[in-house]
Image: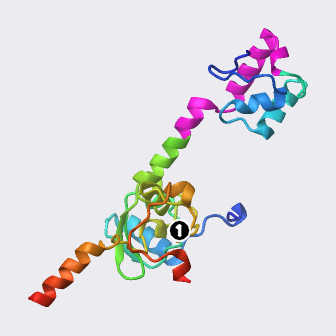
Amino acid sequence: MPRVIGVDIPPNKRLEIALTYIYGVGRTTSAQICKDLNLDPGMRARDLNEDQLTVIANHIQKTYSVEGQLRRQVTASINRLRDIACYRGLRHRRGLPTRGQRTRTNARTRKGPRKTVAGKKSVKGMK
Amino acid sequence: MSRSIKKGPYVDAKVMKKVTALKKSGKKDPITTWARACTILPDFVGLTFLVHNGKHHMKVLVTEDMVGHKLGEFAPTRRFGGHTNKKEEEKSSLHTEGG
């Protein structure tokens, strides 16, 4: 199994898709990488030789921030919002959506599983 | 959609006037304002603003990290005190009836 950037082990997939298994590389970035390095996006990841792997790894590390570095960047910017106590930061603290979505219903991704409150009227009853 | 770069950041004219006056005098008095939509410029760092939240003026001490945000982002307009517990509510109403 080929390894690119530490732990990532993309399997028997097209190179274009295999690269997206790296955190921070999506379809667009992946296609761009193939184009920049003149690699066939349709080739299987297992067919890559050692040289190609190092070239890909170097190119990604030079051009993009991926994996741990990117994760750290994301947490750092969220923590910045929290620390300055702006509206978005407050929403992050409370675990609610930060971009003005409704929270009366839905918003389950941020709020997690429903916590039923006894005695509260059902959604049907509210209408 | 974000604001066109051509226009530059939106800064309330009155706030800007007060800031420049304050900078000149060298004092650190808080600036009372209703201009929640005003962008925080690097010049504002270290100043205190009293930003209106619809009811009161909230104290906002501008730090370096706040540059680029709007004044209103630091003065929440809603207050949520949490839901009342139904059992406790009944208890308290019983107490008031008994008393």
In the rendering, at what x and y percent does residue B74 appear? 43, 65
Image quadrant assignment for residue B88: bottom left
> Does the stretch in magenta take in A72?
yes
In the rendering, at what x and y percent does residue A114 appear? 49, 60
> Does the stretch in magenta take in B76?
no
Toward the top, the furthest residue is A50
Which quarter shows the N terminus of chain B? Answer: bottom right
Q: Tell me if residue A46 comes above or below residue A121 in the rendering.
A: above
Q: Residues within 10 Å of mark 1 (few under 14, many from 20)?
A: few
Q: Residue A22 versus residue A106: which sits nearer the camera? A: A106
Horizontal side of B17 relative to B99 (left or right) equals right
Residue at image location 42% in from the left, 58% down from the top: A94
Give me the chain letter of mark 1: A
In the rendering, at what x and y percent does residue A81 appear? 47, 53
**Residue that numbered label 1 is attached to:** A103
Query: Bounds of the magenta span?
Result: A45-73
Horizontal side of A45 relative to B17 (left or right) equals right
Q: Secondary structure at mark 1?
A: loop
Which is the main secondary structure of the residues drawn in magenta? helix
Q: Tell me if residue A71 comes above or below residue A96 in the rendering.
A: above
Residue at image location 41% in from the left, 58% down from the top: A85
Report how many numbered discs are placed on residues in the image.
1
